[in-house]
């Protein structure tokens, strides 16, 4: 048994220790032999071990050089384990798909969870499902509905790409060291995007990013130069509304009224 790794604050490391929680997460993952699974942030391998025992193969992406170098030894050098010492924010997950679909799991570092989710959404076409432990606040934002304080850019774009299911909460005492926040487990299942949705993406992403970048302003003010009153009227969207009141479909309708490159309404 190797000595425990000292958690590093700069990597946002909190290691799961509660065996009941670990068992519950593995049961939610339902790993099966031969599945192509990649784990982000395996840490000391508490999820890695039971998953690879069931699948026989597993890729893991770990930024911490010490953890990446010692993981295989910690687990008894299991066959089928491939360790990628890399930054998940820059990692090409599609390179592991091999023409098929990946399953992605992990206890995501809380300090990079939102940009990491956006990085994965951009590669959603090669992902069959994702199951993550995240800060509860982030899960709340992912599943938030229009009109709630948690609703924002992450809510809109995640709902475009995925069906989401909040599975269960995890208390701070399940970790060492305990984080100062509650955690939660979420399952995200990518949806196939239509050709029209793919064509709409640049305009939609710009509208959502810009409007929520100034969420206290009305849409007319935050989207000035991108959307004029004629576009708002055509889309049936109130220009005096604030972005957190618009549904994904309303954002999509608004995006369709303008040219993604010029910001002008389509003829």
Image (cartoon, rainbow, N blue to C red):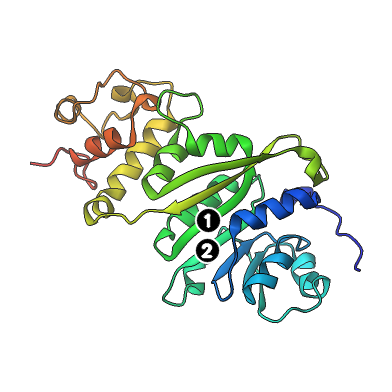
**Residue beneath disc 1:** 130
Q: Residue 248: percent from the left, percent from the top?
A: 33, 37
Q: Is residue 173 left or right of residue 142?
A: right
- Contact between labelled residues 2 and 1, with CB atoms less than 8 Å apart: yes
Q: Say what secondary structure mark 1 lies in.
A: strand
Residue at 43% of width from left, 30% of height from top? 145
On residue 169, the disc is: none
Q: In terms of depth relative to the viewer, which is nearer, 77 or 267?
A: 77
Q: In terms of depth relative to the viewer, which is nearer, 92 or 190?
A: 190
Q: Residue 139: percent from the left, percent from the top?
A: 56, 39
**Residue beneath disc 2:** 103
Residue at 60% of width from left, 65% of height from top? 31
Q: Residue 155: percent from the left, percent from the top?
A: 45, 38
Residue at 68% of width from left, 51% of height from top? 24
Residue at 22% of width from left, 40% of height from top? 263
| Classed neighbour count for the residue bearing mark 2: other residues with Cα under 10 Å, few (<14), some (14–19), many (≥20) | some
Instruction: Judge whether 40 appears above or below 215 on screen.
Output: below
Sequence-wise first label, 1 or 2: 2
């Amino acid at each position: 048994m190797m000595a425990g790794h000292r958690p590093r604050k700069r990597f946002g490391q909190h290691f799961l220790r509660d065996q009941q929680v670990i068992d519950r997460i593995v049961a939610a993952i339902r790993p099966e032999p031969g599945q192509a699974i990649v784990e982000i942030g395996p840490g000391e391998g508490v999820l890695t071990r039971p998953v690879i025992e069931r699948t026989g193969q597993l890729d893991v992406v770990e930024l911490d050089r010490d953890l990446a170098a010692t993981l295989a030894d910690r687990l008894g050098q299991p066959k089928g384990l491939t360790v990628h010492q890399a930054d998940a924010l820059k990692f090409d997950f599609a390179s592991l798909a091999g023409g098929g679909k990946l399953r992605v799991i992990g206890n995501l570092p809380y300090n990079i969870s939102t940009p990491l989710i956006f990085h994965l959404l951009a590669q959603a076409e090669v992902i069959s499902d994702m199951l993550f432990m995240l800060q509860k606040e982030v899960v709340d934002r992912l599943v938030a509905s229009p009109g709630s304080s948690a609703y924002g850019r992450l809510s809109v774009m995640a709902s475009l790409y995925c069906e989401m299911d909040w599975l269960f909460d995890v208390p701070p005492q399940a970790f060492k060291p305990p984080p100062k926040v509650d955690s939660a487990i979420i399952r995200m299942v990518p949806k196939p995007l239509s050709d029209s949705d793919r064509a709409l993406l640049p305009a939609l992403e710009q509208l959502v990013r810009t409007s929520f970048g100034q969420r206290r302003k009305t849409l007319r003010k935050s989207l000035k130069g991108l959307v004029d009153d004629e576009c708002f009227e055509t889309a049936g969207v109130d220009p005096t509304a604030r972005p957190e009141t618009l549904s994904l479909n309303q954002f999509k309708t608004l995006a369709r009224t303008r040219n993604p490159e010029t910001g002008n309404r389509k003829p």
